[in-house]
């Protein structure tokens, strides 16, 4: 089968006649003219048979949707103004009052916050399940469950779940849709629509803000599916909510897609080098990176991603318990190449300290570490420069008398 990089570089595009350039044009419009009233009355926007209104799609957004569907191994794609709005879109499209959604204990936080605020206000229940325990998910599935979120690896704490086991548990109950937050895997580390043993997720949500953009300069999200009826359900909600993306932003993502495979591998290689180096430091009690033996869910990562041997350039460390939070804050402040800031997938390496105890529901899955946690997002700098930066800030933290 043709490699994904080749598929994305040579993806079909129909340029204007006589203008055989591979780059996709930026089409901007709210109004689209119809030749006559009959065309206005009959042109069908839902099946992409024609253009009707800017919000319903342009030649630029249609090409981006097609390429993202290719990237993720799906058939249909919808674009949203952010990854978070894509998560909210799936919730709103598939849930109604009285239903329940199950969310992994280590899910992307703002998606959970949406369930706790808006979904709760609409009478839609949510429950957390232990992402590392398919039996816990099985036990929490009920007559009310209509949607189950899965995420691999988990946000911040980076546990890699048994995706097959989680999806299998959901398949035991008809009428339950499985949606994956696929931002970490980016369509590259594993195939969400072919997890093995005939298992697949129903919808894959991707924060294009991260690797597809690659520049740290775009906010966008997508929902990829392989089922026309499910796609149409989400698409109708998408239309009624008035979600759309700007043509310039769509073009930025189109420009970055041909290099996503290269960039993902570069982020991955540097991240693993840094993660292994940090394992040797006495200040570090644990390195949480699913591709590293000993990390939570490493065996699941090997089963799901081992053949491609790929992981996102993202990992966390837990400091030794005698290093207090002010010292950890000093370590973050003392970094020069790493900048302090949210998000990932861009060229610049980033660091964020997290208070894990406040992010965990102890009844679902207790946080097992005593020391403070810091998450690194690895950019495109040279690994040696980043290691030098980590070393100088760890040494300075110790010299200042940490713990
Ligand atoms: C960043 C992120 C999102 C949200 O994306 P935004 O475009 O920032 O809204 C969702 N899920 C995961 C796992 C993310 O990392």
Image (spheres, rainbow, N blue to C red):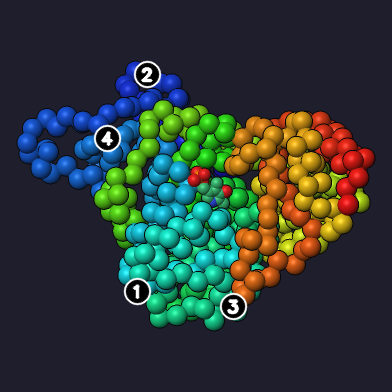
Give the alpha-carbon distance from disc 1 to disc 4, as whole Å: 35 Å
Which residue reaches farthest top? 18
Residue 113 horizontal side relative to residue 259, left or right: left
Q: Quadrant of residue 153?
A: bottom right
Crowd band around label 3 with a 10 angstrom C-alpha radius: few (<14), some (14–19), many (20+): some
Residue 372 horizontal side relative to residue 22, left or right: right
Which of label 4 and label 2 is nearer to you? 4
Residue 246 horizontal side relative to residue 83, left or right: left
Q: Tell me: is circle 3 under 8 Å from ligand 1.
A: no
Q: What label sits on residue 19 in the rendered view? A: 2
Mark sitting earlier along the chain (3/4): 4
Residue 275 horizontal side relative to residue 157, left or right: right
- Which residue carries the number 4 mark? 54
Disc 4, SS: helix
Q: Is residue 399 above or below residue 89?
A: above
The reply to whether residue 251 is in sight is yes
Q: What label sits on residue 136 in the rendered view? A: 3
Give the alpha-carbon distance from disc 2 to disc 3, as whole Å: 57 Å
Which of label 3 and label 4 is nearer to you? 3
């Amino acid at each position: 089968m043709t490699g994904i990089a080749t598929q994305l570089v040579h993806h079909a595009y129909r340029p204007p006649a006589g203008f055989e350039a591979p780059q996709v044009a930026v089409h901007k419009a709210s109004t689209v003219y119809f030749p006559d009233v009959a065309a206005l009355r009959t042109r069908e926007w839902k099946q992409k048979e024609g253009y009707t209104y800017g919000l319903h799609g342009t030649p630029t957004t249609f090409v981006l949707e097609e390429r993202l569907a290719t990237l993720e191994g799906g058939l249909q794609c919808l674009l949203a103004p952010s990854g978070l709005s894509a998560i909210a879109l799936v919730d709103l499209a598939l849930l109604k009052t009285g239903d329940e959604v199950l969310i992994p204990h280590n899910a992307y936080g703002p998606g959970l916050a949406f369930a706790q605020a808006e979904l709760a206000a609409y009478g839609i229940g949510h429950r957390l399940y232990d992402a590392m325990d398919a039996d816990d998910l099985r036990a929490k599935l009920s007559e009310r469950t209509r949607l189950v979120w899965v995420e691999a690896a988990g946000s911040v704490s980076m546990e890699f779940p048994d995706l097959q086991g989680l999806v299998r548990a959901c398949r035991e109950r008809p009428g339950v849709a499985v949606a994956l937050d696929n931002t970490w895997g980016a369509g590259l580390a594993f195939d969400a629509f072919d997890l093995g043993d005939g298992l697949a997720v129903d919808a894959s949500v991707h924060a294009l803000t991260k690797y597809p953009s690659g520049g740290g300069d775009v906010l966008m999200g997508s929902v990829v599916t392989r089922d026309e009826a499910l796609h149409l359900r989400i698409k109708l909600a998408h239309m009624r909510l008035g979600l759309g993306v700007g043509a310039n932003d769509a073009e930025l993502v189109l420009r970055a897609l041909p290099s996503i495979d290269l960039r993902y591998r570069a982020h991955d290689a540097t991240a693993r080098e840094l993660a292994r180096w940090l394992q040797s430091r006495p200040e570090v009690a644990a390195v949480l990176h699913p591709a590293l033996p000993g990390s939570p869910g490493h065996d699941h990562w090997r089963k799901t991603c081992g053949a491609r041997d790929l992981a996102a350039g993202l990992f966390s460390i837990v400091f030794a318990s005698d290093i207090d939070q002010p010292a950890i804050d000093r370590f973050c402040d003392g970094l020069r190449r790493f900048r302090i800031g949210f998000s990932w997938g861009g060229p610049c390496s980033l660091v964020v300290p997290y208070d894990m105890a406040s992010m965990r529901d102890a009844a679902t899955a207790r946080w097992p570490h005593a020391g403070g946690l810091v998450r690194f997002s690895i950019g495109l700098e040279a690994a040696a420069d980043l290691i030098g930066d980590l070393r100088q800030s760890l040494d300075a933290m110790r010299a200042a008398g940490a713990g």
